[in-house]
Structure formats: structure tokens, C-alpha cells
């Protein structure tokens, strides 16, 4: 992996601007192309690409950079590109000299790129305009959008014959694509959002932030996803760039810049208390601050968050504290009329090192908690003396610690809150958060025991209802959806009948999840959608969980019903909703369920990406509850893509984490498909049977159906058909009967059956199953000598395969012309190991055969495939099997994949910075 210098970073997200350039070049009436944009927007990089395109077309191109220094010398900006012109006594004389130079270009129009044309001197601007009007020059200029242009430069571009584009900041998807190309792999959603929050999509700032994070070791990859650890820091180079720009501000502006850097957006009156209106106007004209209408007041803020870090980082503690205190006093003087004023004043006082009343802190922390700003809650409350804490302050602190992954700290705070509680209401408030925190921290039995002990003590009907909600909620995702559904049947289904709305809302996603895995997907969707509407009505109210919590079970239910596109939409919407919050675990579980959805849809690369990001986030916050499932899904995706090394590593890693009961059986999916990828389909089937039995015992019907379908795909449809039919009889949705039809066709082997099930699967967009079904149909129609039907089935198969992201399953290998289809399961396993270079004695030891049997087997394989030695075998099988990594789970001889330049990286996170 190589991180390039700024001039070599790929140009991403500027397709529309390049299309305008192409139109300008093709227009015989056009005289130029002007790129306007703020500092760091990528004006020079776009102009560079324009020049590259012109040179590729064989057109003459020259480049010049205008500077402040060159602007002081008449015609000085042109001296390097037209040296005869720089000594001219006037623009007219310069025009004559320029015409002589251009005469030597064989009648071709010169294309001149002037970077930072806002620094052109007047003589240069006049001369360039004369050359353009004479038809001998096509001008490409970049102009900084901040500040006023010299009249001569403005006149240069004041014509409809100069095409203009205005560069804005890049969007987050474009930044993610840019970083994927630069880093060689995807950047996690939250890390990408962190980059966006600081850079606002400014290309220069993105580049500097990434280079700085790499140099400091904050931006690292686990082999699947790049993540920022420990927060994003503005590096020295970027700070110096910004400070150079800020240094141009007049001396009287420093106080207001410091106010905005420390306090963020403030009212216009507060800004004018630090600097007069003229200073503010000049700062805005320079692009350093901006004013905006906020409700009924005018507000002021710095124009970019990087400015805040540059200014704030240079402040000494005493001066900063004085600024914070002055602003807090101003807002207190207004009577703290705005709802967020309490939070701001408390935060400013704490940051200034002042003692703040506990009631004000609790009020402020409550507001931050309602906004899901959990780190702010911790900042406000973690320094409170033990003797000053109230039950409410401890509950808020414990909840925030849990939400940010500090489960031990949360348990300390919440246990103390429960012990301090003065009445039943306070006990229940502490208990609800405490048991939830224990559960999320993978201490399920302890959470259930705390709930049951409380139920034996708290006697009111209200308390009993709340505790039953607690138990049903935890059982839903702790391996007992059957019991969870039974308990939920005894509890209010309507929010209007619930004793506590927050508790009811926290239970609904789990209720929907329990229904979904039992195959009652339509009912699950009704529950989730009803609760989601309640969330939206109460959004921002005290103790109400985020509405995205309902979308996890929505994704699950849609997926298990075979409605994959709707599941994807719901999941990605939830992730976007969570981007500005500190709710890591909701996004983590949404990512995991999106990975599962993509796996079911037959998109292994997308599944691997989502599962990989879920695993990276789980590691980041030590959330072991999700890790085994995420790593198993990652391994399955990698195995089906042929990346056996990555699959083996994920399977080994997954074994270090506990099974949690939720989606029981799916934690072995990666192990099974790794066996299949290395040619040992029999062992893959054995693992899948064991996993399916675990799902059956725990009541996860949809998971069991998924695993049994995979048993059939690996060669044993007759073993699972009866059970799949039983499951389909009690599951709703279109996916369950389609699976039965597919497995029945595998058992039957008839072309008609495969064709029929392909027609059932295709509308579901279950692309990989659709491809396999149609390939089976094509082979069967060929055997029946029905070439027209065989061709039609093959066309349908190829259309589905095009959406399968390079999947390589045993069925695809056997049905798509691979020489492996002539081999038995055991012969395929021997062939894979031999092609990988494993010695015959080691193969014999692994498969528990004699060396003589392996030698004889290899001779049979050579004869069937038409080769004579291992080298030819490896060459023959290379495109169908990952022959460098067929050592099986836990043992891999594979090398890391080569990069774009053909070299292999020497370390997983190494970055060469140029």
C-alpha cells in the first residue's frame, strides 16, 4: 500500500467539471476554462488533469504559477513560459513577442494553464486577454474564490466564451472513494465521518489529516478496514498552513477568533463584544468567519473547523479560561433563554476549571444525553466529587460510559446509583440501565440474575412489568427467542398501555428480532415500524433511545423475508442517522446485519466489507459480544471470494471470542465455507450440520434454514430437504419456499426443477442462488440435448453472476467449465493441497491416508485433468482455486495479495509516504 504525495492523489468526484472542460475544448468559440474555488478545494489538481488530457491529445500545453511576488513585476508571471515576453516594454510589445512564439506552434492554438490567476499583474492579464481574442491562446486558469479580484483579472474572464466551474467540498461518499484508492482499502464509516467533520471535504485538509494520522500511527488497518484510533488530530503541517492564513488577519481580530475557536457558534452581539463590526466584515470577506441566521438571531462561527484547532491550540490556559468565562457570563446575563444555553454554560465553566453546581451539571448532562452526545456527558460528570453525586447523575454517567464502550466504568457508576436510590422509581431507573449495560458488555447471566433478584424485591405491578420487559429483551438476543416471544406476549403491545415509554421502546427492537428469527417476519416488521413511528414523535425526549435501534430488527426481518433491497435501504439509512452521535453499538449492529443481508443476497465482497467494519468497530470499543459473528461473516465472504488466507485468519481470530446465543449457528458459517474453499466440502457439510443443530435447539429457524441450504449447496440436498420443508411451513415471506424449491431441485436434478426455482429466486435478488440454479439448469438442459433452453438458462446465470462480486463457490466451479468438476470431493481436496505445494507426506498426515494412497490419487487426478505434474496442476487450477492458500483452517501458506504495482507489502499496516 502506498500513500502518494498530494500532486499524485487520484482525482475523484470531479467528473462533472471535467465534462465541462471537454465541452470547452471541443467548442471552437471557447476562449478558456476557469476553475474557481476556496483554498484547498483541488483547483490545481483539476487543472493538472486538464493539462494531461490536452497533452494526451497531442496539443501544445504550457504551465505557469502566478504568485504575490510575480504580481509586483509587469508581465512577470509569464517570464517562464514566454521568456521573450517578460522583457517587453508594454502589453502591446508583449503581444508582438508572444505572436512570434506562437507562430512556431504549427498553427495550433497554445493552451496555457495559469494556476492562482488571482495573483496575475494587470499587464499579464491584459496581454492574455489580447492573445485569447486573437484566437491564438486557450486559457485555463484557477482562481481562489475568497477575496476580490483585480479589475484586469476580472475583465480577463468576463466573457461567455470562458467556461466556468466552481469547486465545492467533496461529499463523504466521494471522500471515502478517494481514500479507498489512496489507502488500498475501505475506511470505516465512523472514521470517514470523523475526517469529514474536521475537513468538511476540503481535499487539501483531507490529504494532510490522512498523512498526519498515518505518520502518528492513528490511522491503521486490520487487513479489512482502515480506522482512526484515539481521535483525529490536526497535524503540524496543516496547523502551520492555517496559521499562515490566519496571520493575515488584523491585530484587532484575535480576540473574536479565539472566542469562536473555543465556544463555536455565538450570537452576533457576543462576537461584536470582542471586535467591532468592521473587523467582522473584513474577516468574513477573507473567508475566515461566516455569519448565518439561526432561528431569530444572527450568529457567527469560524468558516472551517480546522481554524478552531489552529487558533485554540496556540492559546495559553489562562487566556483561554478568561475567554470561556466571559462568554459564560454573557449567556448567563441573558437568562440562558435558549434550551442549549445550559449545556454551553456548564461546559464552558468546566473547561475554564471552575466549580459548577451539581444541579446545573445534571441538567446539562441530561441535555447532552438526549442529543446522544455521550462523551460530553462523561466530560461534564466524571470530575464530580463522589459525595456530590446524585442517583440521576450516576445513571447519566453510567449510561454514557456504557454507550461509549466502558462497561466496567458503567457498572461501577450504576451499581452505586442503585445502592443510592431513595425510592422505587430511582431503583428502577438505575436497574434498567445497569442490566442493559451488563448485557451489552457480554455479562448476560449476571444481567439476568440482577433482574431476577430485583423482581423478588420490587412488588408493584409497574415494577414487575418493567422487569419482565427487561428479561424478555435480553432473552431475545441471548439465545432464547422462544421464551422471549412468550414473555412479550404477556406485555403491552401498545405504547399507550405501557408503564414506561422508554422501557417499552427499548424492548420493541428485541421483540421484533425474536419474531424475525422465528420466521414471523411480517409481524416483526409491524412491531418495528410501529415503534419507529413512536420514536420519531418523541425524538429528543428524556431517556428515549435513538430511533435507529428499530432499524436493526427491520434489516433482520427484511433479510429473512428475502426483501434484500429494502433491508439495505433501512440499514444504510440507520447508519447515516447515527453519524453525528456517539452511539457506536447501534451502528456496529447495523453494519453486522447489513453484512448478513449482503451474504444472503449473494454479494460476498459487500458482505465482507460490512462484516469487516463491524469487527473493526467492535474491537475499537472492546465489544466482544459482536466479534465472533462479525469475524465468521467476514471469513465466509473472504472464503467465497477465494481469499483463503484472510478467511483462515478470521476463523482463527473468531475462536478467541465467546458464542453469545444470538443468531446461533451463524458463528460457524466462516469455518464451513473455509473448508469448502479449500476443497473439503465434506468437512464443510459437517460443520454446517452442527451449526444448524445449534440454531434448531435455540429456536433460530431462519438461521437454521440458511445453514441447511448451504449443506445442500455443498452436495447433500437429500439430507436436509425434509427439515427445510418443515421450517418453510411455519415461516412467512418468499425466501423460505424458494430455498425449498432450490434444494428440491438439487435433490431431483431435473432441468425443469432448476429452471422453476431460478424463476422463484430471481425476483428476490438472491443473486448467487439464482446463478447456481440457472447454471444447474443449463447443464441439465445440455444433457437433455435442449441447446436453446440451455443457452437461455446460461444467459440468466451470467446475468446473476455479474452481480455476485466475483463469488467462487463449489457449484460455480463445477458448473462453469472448471476441470475440478470431474473430481470427487476427496480428489479436489488432494488437488488443492498439491497445487498449493504441500508435500505428499503432509497431505497424507492431514487427510489420514498413506503416502502411497496420495501418490495414486494424484496420478488419477493428473489423468482426469490432463496434466502430468504438480506445476501443471497448479497452473491449470489457478483461476479456479486459491492454490497458494489451501492449507485449511488454521494453516495457510498464502502470501499477501499483490498491490497495483505488483509488489507485496511487507506489513499489514505499513504505508510508504512520499
Image (cartoon, grey):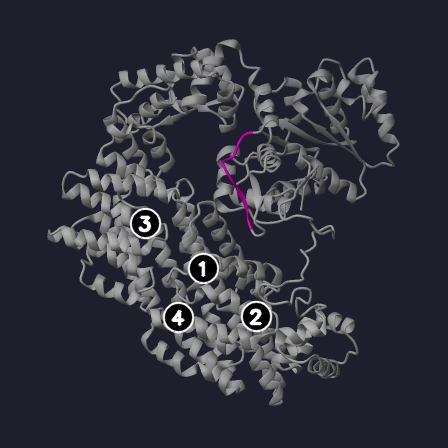
User: Residue 798 occupies which quadrant of the picture?
Assistant: bottom right
Q: Mark 4 points at which residue?
A: 694
Residue 583 visible: yes
Separation (CA) of disc 4 from disc 1: 14 Å
Vertical arrangement, residue 628 with respect to residue 715, above or below: above
Label tally? 4
Residue 497 visible: no
Q: Mark 2 points at which residue?
A: 675
Separation (CA) of disc 3 from disc 4: 25 Å
| Residue 760 x, y percent position in the rendering | 45, 76
Query: Please, what secondary structure does the residue beneath circle 2 have?
Result: helix
Q: Decide which of tag 4 and tag 1 comes sooner along the chain.
A: 1
Separation (CA) of disc 1 from disc 2: 18 Å
Q: Decide which of tag 4 and tag 2 comes sooner along the chain.
A: 2
User: Which of these two is toward me, 185 or 154?
Assistant: 185
Q: Decide which of tag 2 and tag 3 comes sooner along the chain.
A: 3
Q: Which of marks 4 and 1 is in front?
A: 4
Q: Name the residue under label 1.
A: 629
| Residue 488 x, y percent position in the rendering | 22, 61
* Prevalent SS, magenta region: loop
Residues at circles 2 and 3 in contact by the CB criterion of under 8 Å: no
Q: Name the residue: 44% across, 45% down.
A: 621
Vertical arrangement, residue 725 with respect to residue 139, above or below: below
- The mark found on residue 438 in the picture is 3
Query: Please, what secondary structure does the residue beneath circle 3 have?
Result: helix
Query: Please, what secondary structure does the residue beneath circle 4 have?
Result: helix
User: Which of these two is toward me, 890 or 99?
Assistant: 890
Amino acid at each position: 500500500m502506498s500513500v502518494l504525495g498530494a500532486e499524485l492523489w487520484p482525482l475523484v468526484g470531479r467528473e462533472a467539471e471535467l465534462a465541462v472542460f471537454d465541452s470547452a475544448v471541443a467548442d471552437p468559440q471557447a476562449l478558456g476554462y476557469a476553475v474557481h474555488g476556496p483554498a484547498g478545494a483541488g483547483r490545481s489538481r483539476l487543472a493538472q488533469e486538464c493539462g494531461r488530457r490536452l497533452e494526451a491529445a497531442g496539443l501544445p500545453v504550457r504551465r505557469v504559477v502566478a504568485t504575490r511576488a510575480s504580481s509586483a513585476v509587469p508581465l512577470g508571471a509569464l517570464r517562464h513560459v514566454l521568456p521573450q515576453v517578460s522583457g517587453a516594454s508594454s502589453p502591446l510589445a508583449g503581444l508582438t513577442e508572444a505572436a512570434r512564439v506562437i507562430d512556431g506552434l504549427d498553427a495550433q492554438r497554445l493552451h496555457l494553464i495559469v494556476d492562482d490567476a488571482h495573483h496575475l499583474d494587470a499587464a499579464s492579464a491584459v496581454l492574455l486577454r489580447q492573445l485569447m481574442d486573437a484566437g491564438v491562446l486557450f486559457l485555463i486558469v484557477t482562481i481562489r474564490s475568497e477575496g476580490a479580484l483585480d479589475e484586469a483579472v476580472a475583465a480577463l474572464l468576463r466573457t461567455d466564451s470562458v467556461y466556468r466551474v466552481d469547486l465545492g467540498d467533496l461529499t463523504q461518499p466521494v471522500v471515502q472513494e478517494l481514500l479507498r484508492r489512496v489507502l488500498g482499502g475501505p475506511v470505516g464509516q465512523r472514521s470517514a465521518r470523523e475526517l469529514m467533520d474536521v475537513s468538511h471535504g476540503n481535499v487539501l485538509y483531507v490529504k494532510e489529516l490522512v498523512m498526519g494520522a498515518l505518520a502518528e500511527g492513528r490511522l491503521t488497518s486490520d487487513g479489512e478496514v482502515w480506522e482512526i484510533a484515539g481521535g483525529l488530530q490536526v497535524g503540524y503541517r496543516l496547523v502551520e498552513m492555517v496559521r499562515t492564513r490566519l496571520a493575515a488577519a488584523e491585530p484587532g481580530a484575535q480576540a473574536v477568533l479565539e472566542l469562536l475557536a473555543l465556544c463555536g457558534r455565538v450570537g452576533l452581539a457576543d462576537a461584536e463584544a470582542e471586535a467591532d463590526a468592521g473587523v467582522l466584515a473584513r474577516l468574513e470577506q477573507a473567508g475566515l468567519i461566516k455569519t448565518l441566521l439561526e432561528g431569530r438571531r444572527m450568529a457567527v462561527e469560524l468558516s472551517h473547523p480546522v481554524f478552531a484547532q489552529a487558533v485554540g491550540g496556540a492559546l495559553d490556559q489562562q487566556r483561554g479560561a478568561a475567554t470561556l468565562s466571559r462568554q459564560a457570563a454573557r449567556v448567563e446575563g441573558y437568562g440562558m433563554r435558549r434550551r442549549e444555553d445550559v449545556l454551553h454554560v456548564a461546559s464552558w465553566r468546566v473547561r475554564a476549571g471552575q466549580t459548577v453546581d451539581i444541579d446545573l451539571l445534571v441538567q446539562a448532562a441530561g441535555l447532552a444525553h438526549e442529543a446522544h452526545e455521550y462523551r460530553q456527558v462523561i466530560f461534564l460528570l466524571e470530575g464530580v466529587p463522589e459525595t456530590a453525586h446524585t442517583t440521576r447523575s450516576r445513571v447519566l454517567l453510567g449510561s454514557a460510559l456504557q454507550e461509549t464502550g466502558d462497561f466496567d466504568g458503567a457498572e461501577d457508576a450504576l451499581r452505586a446509583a442503585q445502592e443510592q436510590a431513595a425510592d422505587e422509581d430511582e431503583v428502577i431507573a438505575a436497574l434498567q440501565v445497569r442490566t442493559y449495560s451488563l448485557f451489552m458488555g457480554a455479562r448476560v447471566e449476571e444481567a439476568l440474575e440482577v433482574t431476577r433478584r430485583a423482581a423478588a424485591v420490587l412488588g408493584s405491578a409497574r415494577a414487575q412489568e418493567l422487569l419482565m420487559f427487561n428479561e424478555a429483551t435480553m432473552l431475545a438476543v441471548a439465545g432464547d427467542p422462544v421464551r422471549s416471544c412468550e414473555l412479550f406476549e404477556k406485555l403491552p403491545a401498545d405504547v399507550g398501555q405501557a408503564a414506561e415509554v422508554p422501557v417499552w421502546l427499548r424492548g420493541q427492537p428485541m421483540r421484533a428480532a425474536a419474531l424475525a428469527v422465528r420466521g414471523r417476519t411480517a409481524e416483526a416488521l409491524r412491531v418495528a415500524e410501529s415503534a419507529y413511528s413512536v420514536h420519531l414523535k418523541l425524538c429528543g425526549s428524556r431517556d428515549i433511545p435513538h430511533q435507529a435501534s428499530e432499524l436493526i430488527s427491520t434489516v433482520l426481518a427484511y433479510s429473512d423475508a428475502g426483501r434484500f433491497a429494502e433491508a439495505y435501504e433501512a440499514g444504510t439509512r440507520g447508519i447515516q442517522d447515527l453519524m453525528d452521535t456517539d452511539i457506536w453499538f447501534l451502528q456496529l449492529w447495523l453494519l453486522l446485519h447489513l453484512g448478513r443481508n449482503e451474504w444472503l443476497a449473494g454479494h460476498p465482497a459487500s458482505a465482507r466489507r460490512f462484516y469487516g467494519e463491524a469487527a473493526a468497530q467492535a474491537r475499537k470499543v472492546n465489544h466482544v459480544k459482536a466479534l465472533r459473528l462479525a469475524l465468521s461473516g467476514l471469513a465466509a465472504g473472504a472464503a467465497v471470494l477465494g481469499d483463503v488466507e484472510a478467511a483462515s485468519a478470521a476463523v482463527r481470530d473468531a475462536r478467541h471470542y465467546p458464542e453469545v446465543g444470538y443468531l446461533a449457528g451463524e458463528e460457524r458459517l466462516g469455518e464451513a465455507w473455509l473448508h469448502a474453499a479449500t476443497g473439503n466440502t465434506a468437512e464443510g457439510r459437517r460443520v454446517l450440520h452442527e451449526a444448524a443443530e445449534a440454531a434448531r435447539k435455540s429456536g433460530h429457524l431462519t438461521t437454521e434454514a440458511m445453514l441447511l441450504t448451504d449443506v445442500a449447496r455443498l452436495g447433500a440436498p437429500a439430507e436436509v430437504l425434509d427439515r427445510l420443508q418443515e421450517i418453510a411451513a411455519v415461516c412467512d415471506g418468499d425466501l423460505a419456499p424458494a430455498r425449498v424449491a432450490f434444494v428440491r431441485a438439487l435433490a431431483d436434478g431435473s432441468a425443469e426443477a432448476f429452471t422453476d426455482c431460478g424463476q422463484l429466486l430471481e425476483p428476490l435478488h438472491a443473486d448467487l442462488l439464482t446463478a447456481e440454479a440457472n447454471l444447474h439448469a443449463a447443464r441439465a438442459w445440455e444433457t437433455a440435448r435442449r441447446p436453446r433452453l440451455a443457452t437461455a438458462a446460461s444467459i440468466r446465470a451470467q446475468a446473476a453472476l455479474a452481480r455476485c462480486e466475483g463469488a467462487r463457490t463449489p457449484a460455480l466451479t463445477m458448473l462453469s467449465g472448471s476441470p475440478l468438476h470431474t473430481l470427487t470431493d476427496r480428489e479436489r481436496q488432494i488437488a488443492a493441497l498439491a497445487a498449493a505445494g504441500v508435500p505428499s507426506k503432509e497431505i497424507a498426515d492431514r487427510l489420514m491416508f498413506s503416502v502411497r494412497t496420495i501418490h495414486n490419487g494424484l496420478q488419477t487426478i493428473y489423468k482426469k485433468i490432463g496434466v502430468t505434474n504438480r506445476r501443471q496442476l497448479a497452473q491449470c487450477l489457478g483461476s479456479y482455486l486459491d492454490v497458494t492458500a489451501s492449507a485449511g483452517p488454521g494453516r495457510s501458506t498464502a502470501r499477501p495479495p499483490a498491490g497495483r504495482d505488483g509488489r507485496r507489502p511487507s506489513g499489514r499496516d505499513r504505508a510508504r509516504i512520499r
